[in-house]
Image: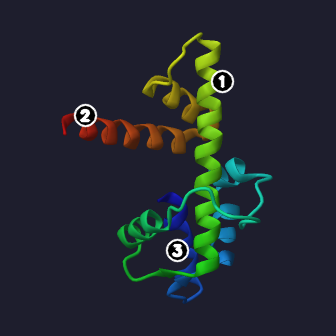
């Protein structure tokens, strides 16, 4: 949501109603935490995407910028970003579980991985939203 919000702001600043790859690049370069997180991560997709998140990306975009669209290229970049981030967090969570001699990943290992992978406020926000989603899931 943070990246979509910043990219939407960049699009608005350029008097556009559609996010294009350039707006995502500007959003990352102008945000210290995102720039640090994505340093060295290539943009775009060089092959088939492992998982498709475009429906969720679009829903979040409409929550943060209801009047802004997103180009197909920008959607591919966002999808690649989310897939890469999920993979990195899962790998780190597995390492945390191994260090703690655990056979099963729990929310504690995921939270630790998020804290290790994401910088500062992004980690705190991600863990907060994750805890809220887990609480809702457990009540249903």
Q: Which residue is mark 2?
A: 138
133 lies above or below 1? above
Residue in the foreground of this view, choosing between 51 and 90:
51
Q: Where is residue 70? Give x, y as percent.
A: 53, 79
Tell me if 110 is positioned left or right of 91 in this view: left
Q: Nearer the viewer, mark 3 or mark 1?
A: 1
In the rendered image, which quarter contains the C terminus? top left
The residue located at (59%, 10%) in the rendering is 101
- Badge 1 crowding class, 10 Å Cα cut-off, few under 14, some 14 to 19, many 20 or more, is some
> Measured from the top left, where is residue 61 in percent x and y?
43, 70
CA separation in Å, label 3 and label 1: 36 Å
Crowding near the residue tagged with mark 3, few <14, some 14–19, many ≥20 C-alpha atoms within 10 Å: many
Residue reaching furthest left? 140
The quarter of the picture where residue 117 lies is top right
Q: Which comes sooner in the sequence, label 2 or label 1?
A: 1
Q: How many marks?
A: 3
When the figure is inspected, residue 137 is found, relative to residue 24, above or below; the finding is above
- Image coordinates of residue 104 in percent, x first then y, are 50, 20
Residue at the image point whose x is 76% and y is 52% from the top: 39
Q: Going from the N terminus, do you reach mark 2 or mark 3 first?
A: 3
Gap in Å between the C-alphas at discs 2 and 3?
Answer: 35 Å
Residue matched to label 3 = 9
Q: From the viewer's perspective, is 47 left or right of 76?
A: right
Query: From this viewpoint, which residue is outermost toward the right?
Result: 40
Mark linked to residue 95:
1
Per the image, label 2 sits on a secondary structure element best described as helix
In 3D space, how far apart are the residues under numbered discs 2 and 1 (Cα atoms)? 26 Å
Discs 2, 1 touching: Cβ within 8 Å: no
Q: Which percent across, then down, holds residue 118?
A: 60, 41
- Say which of 33 and 52 sits in front: 52
Q: Identify which residue is drawn at 41% across, 65% down.
A: 60
Dot 1 lies on which element?
helix
């Amino acid at each position: 949501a943070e990246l979509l919000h910043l990219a939407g702001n960049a699009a608005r600043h350029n008097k556009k109603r559609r996010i294009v790859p350039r707006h995502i690049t500007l959003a990352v370069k102008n945000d210290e935490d995102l720039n640090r997180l994505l340093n060295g991560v290539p943009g775009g997709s060089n092959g088939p995407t492992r998982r498709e998140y475009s429906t969720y990306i679009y829903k979040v975009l409409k929550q943060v910028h209801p009047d802004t669209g997103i180009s197909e290229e920008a959607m591919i970049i966002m999808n690649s970003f989310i897939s890469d981030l999920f993979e990195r967090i899962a790998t780190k969570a597995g390492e945390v579980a191994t260090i703690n001699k655990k056979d099963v990943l729990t929310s504690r290992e995921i939270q630790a991985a998020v804290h290790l992978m994401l910088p500062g406020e992004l980690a705190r926000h991600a863990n907060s939203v994750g805890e809220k989603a887990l609480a809702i899931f457990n009540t249903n």
